[in-house]
Image (cartoon, rainbow, N blue to C red):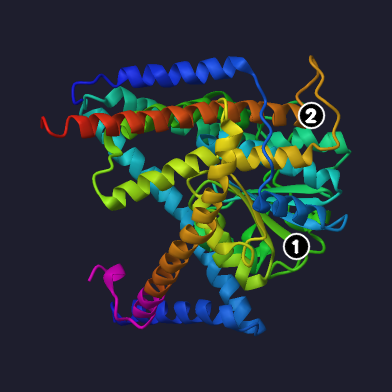
Amino acid sequence: MKREIPIAMTMLAGLIVTAAFFSKAPWLQAANAELLSWALIFFSVAFLLGIGNLFRINLKQIAMRHPDWPYKAILLITLSGYLILGLLEIEGFIVYGDGSLGNKVYQDWIHGAVFKPLQATMFSLLAFYIASAAFRAFRARSFEATLLLGAGAVVMLAQVPLPIPGGSAIGSIVQPMQHFLMAFVNTAGQKAIIMGAALGVLATGLRIVLGIERSYLSE
Amino acid sequence: MKDFDRRWIFLAMGIVVVSLFTLEKPTEMPPSEYVQSYYDTIEALPEGSIVMLSADFDPASAAELLPTYQATIHHLLRRNIRVINVATWPAAPPYTRAGFDEIAPLYGKAYGTDWVELGFIPGDDVAMGSIGQSLRSAYATDDRDSTPIAELPLLDGIQDRMEGIEVLISMSAGYPGILEWIAQVGGRYEVPILTATTAVQTPDLFAYYPTQLSGFAGAATGATQYLQLVTVDMPVAVEGEPETLVDVKVNNQERMLIQAGAHMLILLLILVGNLLYFFTKGSR
């Protein structure tokens, strides 16, 4: 029964959610909405499990004086601090001004002053690494690689207004080429990949719903 | 070439970016068919319509998406279109609050009747499916001050299966984002969808336009083109006054010049790298 009950539940849930795509029967739609609500609850609980696991692993390493233990301590302090501040603010124990700006003002301040610049800085570094990688890795070693390089160069040139003498003339040549590449060549390739992937997902979904694929049961 | 110090490349990129940044030269770009369609779809909405605006991004992609996001908020509110804000990325709601707190008063719009913030919902595609199936099941309260959503007048006319929502707009930086909205909501409930995406995701969109996607603004280029359309009849920016949409447009146009410089440097590096490769091929 340890195997049969989960397989039956999976089959039932899968069939209801799939059937709800094709039928507007009220009972089916209600069942689908209920199942989706359960799924959202599971996702939220997963966050709690994740936080618990993060504490368990990092506290253990702090206690063992792992070489990186100060960073792990900072992680836990930051996580706890933001969580406590958030709960206090949402529950109304901390209110900014007359409260008309809502109950996330302090959380948003931390987001804007700390998280936003840090993440934006990390992402901005890509400009430097892409330039370095382009110099080292993009080689016309074969016919296919040359085609790829040519297409990339056309798209990059057409994507921006060129600030050089004759820039508009170059733009007027590469822009129709870019349109052809993106709207026809790219679209045809994308559609083929999408259809292939969709059929693969459908096959995998059917295998799970029918109980053939059981890897989610650790089998 | 193996011994080449890549810090020279970093320095070259730094010089290009900083020098073009100080030049402050706005550059105009003609709108593409896809951006024009994004703009026209919003223009065609009747006053009082309700639009769902999903913030599916975080600070890493804000440089590409925030200008379109702010311009879209201006565009919607200026046309007296009401907005339901949702988010499938946890770091997105602060952008929603900041945007609406700043922009809504300019058009005399009130929270609860003209716009609402439902906030982040975990669950990726499942969350999108749940929003499409029943907004009231997906959210119990709003994200601004935990008001039960039954008390938000804007949601009075909204039924299950997206009934009452004229258009869904996703500011998409990846997964979950526009492709999941199309799969879970667009085709299923026949809601027109618009999107603004990062450059990396833009090539994926052509396959869906115009049947499953009514229009899109791809990356900073799309943002620049859309901002030009939205600000056509707006007054020019005044120095010393708070930032307006026209300032956002000008800033974005200036940034296009920086992006153009960076693109050209990368192409030059590829060219030099290949020339060195071919000329040293024999000696290796």
Asked if residue A195 lies in the magenta stretch, the reply is no
Residue occupying the point 48% across, 19% down: B16
* Amino acid at the residue labelled 2: Asp
Q: Which residue is mark 2?
A: A98
Circle 1 crowding by C-alpha within 10 Å: few under 14, some 14–19, many from 20: many
Circle 2 crowding by C-alpha within 10 Å: few under 14, some 14–19, many from 20: few
In which quadrant of the rendered view does residue B164 lie?
bottom right
Q: Which residue is mark 1?
A: B165
Q: Foreground residue, B233 or A181?
A: A181
In which quadrant of the rendered view does residue A36 lie?
bottom right
> What percent of the width, then of the height, locates residue B83?
76, 51
> What percent of the width, then of the height, locates residue B192?
69, 63
Residue occupying the point 50% across, 64% down: A39
Q: Is residue B178 above or below residue A4?
A: above
Q: Is residue B91 above or below residue A106?
A: below
Q: Foreground residue, B118 or A131?
A: A131
Mark 2 vs mark 1, foreground winner is: 1
Task: Tell me how far mark 2 sits from mark 1, CA to CA.
Answer: 33 Å
Residue occupying the point 41% across, 33% down: B267
Q: Foreground residue, B2 or B60?
A: B2
Q: Which residues are magenta?
A: A202-219
* B11 with respect to B110 (left or right): left
* Amino acid at the residue labelled 1: Ile
Residue occupying the point 43% across, 21% down: B13
Q: Is residue A181 above or below residue B184?
A: above
